[in-house]
Amino acid sequence: MKPANGTGDQHQTGTGKQARKPAPATPETSAEEPVDERLAGIEPRLVEMIRNEIMHKVDHITWDSIAGLEHAKSSIKEIVVWPMLRPDLFTGLRGPPKGLLLFGPPGTGKTMIGKCIASQARATFFSISASSLTSKWVGEGEKMVRALFAVARCSQPSVIFIDEIDSLLTQRTDGEVEASRRIKTEFLVQFDGAGTSSTDRILVIGATNRPQEIDEAARRRLLKRLYIPLPDAPARATIVRTLLGGMAHSLTDAEIAWVCERTDGYSGSDMDGLCREAAIGPIRAIADILNVSTSDVRPITRADFADALLQVRASVSAQDLEGYLEWNRQYGSLSVKAP
């Protein structure tokens, strides 16, 4: 019995010594890793999930990489780039808006503009989708939204880019799911509610193909609403030259102009698909593809584009375009004349 008691005493004594050792180091640990008071009440698990949405490595995209859209690029520079380069100049009435909406037909470069902002802006860039903020657990979605803005405030200046924002901030109705309604309400409160600060340097950028479905309260908070139209003929020519830059081709400027004349109404994505289809033309002409040398592949010609035009058509209808123009006339920040 005595050995057992002695062993137990030793075990208790050793455990006590081990418990007392980390005690003096606790203040040092908290001093090395201070917890921001803006994260108080936010679960560390949610904070870590939001920090995983920060884009640390993005493709290097410059404004010149985006063909056309001069009105959108100049406005975005005023809203995003200049205030981050010279925050001392953009104060008071010159303070940048907290919300920017990019709307227009699909395939016109809205997401690419977001990537360019991530590449060029000197800010913490969050790329958010509806799936990032939703959960099967009741109440989890609102906590994720609160954590998103809390982490963004701790990482100012911050840019929150939400692709397909209409899927997250659709109009609130009486018959919708309660969990979805609470997420929207929490987002609007965190975006611009009673608890937000006017000095916060957080910009929310939303991209959508369906601006008419966005809730009116969210539309009010997205102060700048820029219409991203289909590329015009010079922009389409720039897209063709850029895409053909790394390929062997024999197209002259006149032939590129010929292609642009026949692609009126094509989006940037449609032009990409057209060039890809034309690039397959020389491969189709090869009889023995297994034994051919890359140097023997003929260059892309105008005939390849003529064949591609039979395969790739415009994906945006005239009726859809009129709907975008009408919404832009009512709510857009810049007027765009109908083509």
Image (cartoon, rainbow, N blue to C red):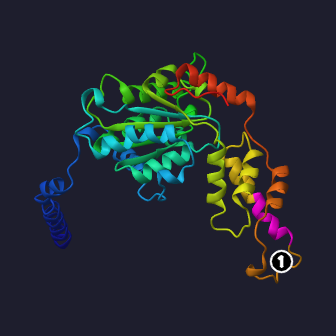
Q: Position of residue 144 (x, y in %)?
A: 42, 38
Place residue 324 in its image quadrant: top right
Q: Position of residue 58 (x, y in %)?
A: 46, 57
**Image vertical order of residue 187 relative to residue 10, above or below:** above
Q: Residue at x 51, y 41 (%)?
A: 70
**Image vertical order of residue 247 relative to residue 220, above or below:** below
Query: Would residue 108 be found to the left or right of residue 22 on screen?
Result: right
Furthest residue toward left: 24
Regarding residue 148, the answer to whether it shows in the image is no
The amino acid on which the numbered mark 1 sits, given as a three-letter code, is Ile
* Prevailing SS of the magenta stretch: helix
Q: Quadrant of the C terminus?
A: top right
Nearer-the-camera pick, 127 or 237: 237
Nearer-the-camera pick, 247 or 42: 247
Q: Residue at x 64, y 41 (%)?
A: 232
Query: Would residue 19 be found to the left or right of residue 228 on screen?
Result: left
Q: Position of residue 123 (x, y in %)?
A: 35, 48
Span shown in magenta: 277-285
Nearer-the-camera pick, 324 or 176: 324
Furthest residue toward front: 254
Query: Would residue 45 be found to the left or right of residue 244 on screen?
Result: left
Furthest residue toward top: 174
Q: Position of residue 62 (x, y in %)?
A: 47, 54
- Mark 1 Cα shell of 10 Å, populated few (<14), some (14-19), many (≥20): few
Q: Residue at x 85, y 68 (%)?
A: 284
Question: Residue 273: within the magenta?
Answer: no
SS of the residue at dot 1?
loop
Residue placed under numbered mark 1 in the picture: 289
Nearer-the-camera pick, 228 or 183: 228
Place residue 240 in its image quadrant: bottom right
Place residue 210 in its image quadrant: top right
Q: Quadrant of the N terminus?
A: bottom left
